[in-house]
Amino acid sequence: MRLRNVKNAKEILESSKYFVKNPEEFKGSWKSVFNNDNPIMIEIGMGKGMFLKNMAKNHPEWNFIGIEKYESVLVRGVENLEEEQLENVRVMCIDAKEIENYLSSEVDSLYLNFSDPWPKKRHHKRRLTHESFLKEYDKVFKSNAHIILKTDNDSLFEFSLMSLCNYGYKFEKIVLDLWNSKEENIRTEYEEKFGNMGFKIKYLEAYKKLEVERNLKR
Amino acid sequence: MRLRNVKNAKEILESSKYFVKNPEEFKGSWKSVFNNDNPIMIEIGMGKGMFLKNMAKNHPEWNFIGIEKYESVLVRGVENLEEEQLENVRVMCIDAKEIENYLSSEVDSLYLNFSDPWPKKRHHKRRLTHESFLKEYDKVFKSNAHIILKTDNDSLFEFSLMSLCNYGYKFEKIVLDLWNSKEENIRTEYEEKFGNMGFKIKYLEAYKKLEVERNLKR
């Protein structure tokens, strides 16, 4: 996403009820933030937050944590969320690389929507489905790993399919043309724009049993 | 492929040096047919044989066995092969379901080119990447299972990615637009026609270690 410097970003964030200022304090105990035992879904790279807002509205039975690396982007996300009164959403400004410092064995599903495709080969290790990230995600999932990904980028989709499968994930769904399928779909801002320009939206859902792996490691 | 009844199909096949009349006799000993130890590649559903012919010409260091269910189609394939003098190709007229009666622990790679997509859900078990077929293929591969698939059909490609991964295959390559990639590619008749009409050709290469599995079963 194109970044513009936003004045007073920090102040705007800190004044929002959705923003969690010291997220490291809730590692392993996010359910206390939401004050219930509902499943916890996270979105890495929440951008302007349209997906997060609409998912939270449609699914009051789930909790959502939006993750965004850049304060200036997260400000737009928070402004979007402020249009609604939602009890089941929080956001934090952290780098996905360091997710294990903020979450521990408590996440049910992870959404990756239109992540940066990092087209150059030498940058592929920065892709959010690179093995090094998948290893981090293992630490934050509750019992099973469950990743839901959307992208319009062929190369990122090919890479993600390979990386997930070769890391031990199995696939629940693969859809090469989401908009022309019968799948339920909440669109992101980016998706709305590029889907309407004719780019095909690709979708996958992958899962991996963690309990077995964790028991083996004991 | 559209089927036309071909007069004297059986006679035409039996008069060709490429056609193996009693393939069950060579189960486990196909290298004696080729009289060498070169890798053995099979194509299930060879159709008119353009892929098989050109692969055999380009790769004299490999042996090829073309498999086709319908005599009337195989006749066209054999006529195509007759244009060349190839020592490294044979064809047989069998149903892929019964492949274990004709081959045993001797195949290096399996090509599936533009297989019937069987669009109706109740027919998905007929798809050549359905689990029931993958189980049969396990019996014919030498040490590692290795499947190379091309299709223009989204639904068959999605299904094949899921079926292969969930059965334990890993991916070496996934390409969503083969013609616009740098991959080497020998086209089939079908591919030539539908690729030129603008359909995107999807490609995958998947492998699975069989030695481990076989040792575990002992």
Image: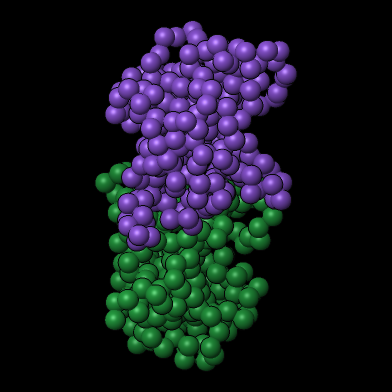
Chain colours: A green, B purple
Which quarter of the rendering shows the N terminus of chain B? top right
In the image shown, does B107 or A119 lie closer to the viewer?
B107
> Which image quadrant for residue B74?
top right
Closer to us: A3 or A195: A195
The quadrant in which residue A25 appears is bottom left
**Where A146 sits versus B172, above or below?**
below
Q: Residue furthest left?
A: A122
Residue at 49 percent of width and 57 percent of height: B166
Quadrant assignment for the C terminus of chain B: bottom left
Position above or below: A127 against A211: above
Q: Is residue B150 visible?
A: no
Nearer the observer, A49 or B121: B121
**Residue B141 visible here:** yes
Number of callouts? 0
Percent position of residue A168, x then y: 39, 61
Q: In the visual, does B177 lie left or right of B48?
A: left
The residue depicted at 38 percent of the width and 32 percent of the height is B29
Residue B200, x across and y down, in percent: 55, 33
Q: Is residue A17 above or below residue B185?
A: below
Vertical placement of A218 versus B143: above or below?
A: below
Residue A172 on image: x %, y %: 55, 60
As drawn, is B208 to the left or to the right of B25?
left
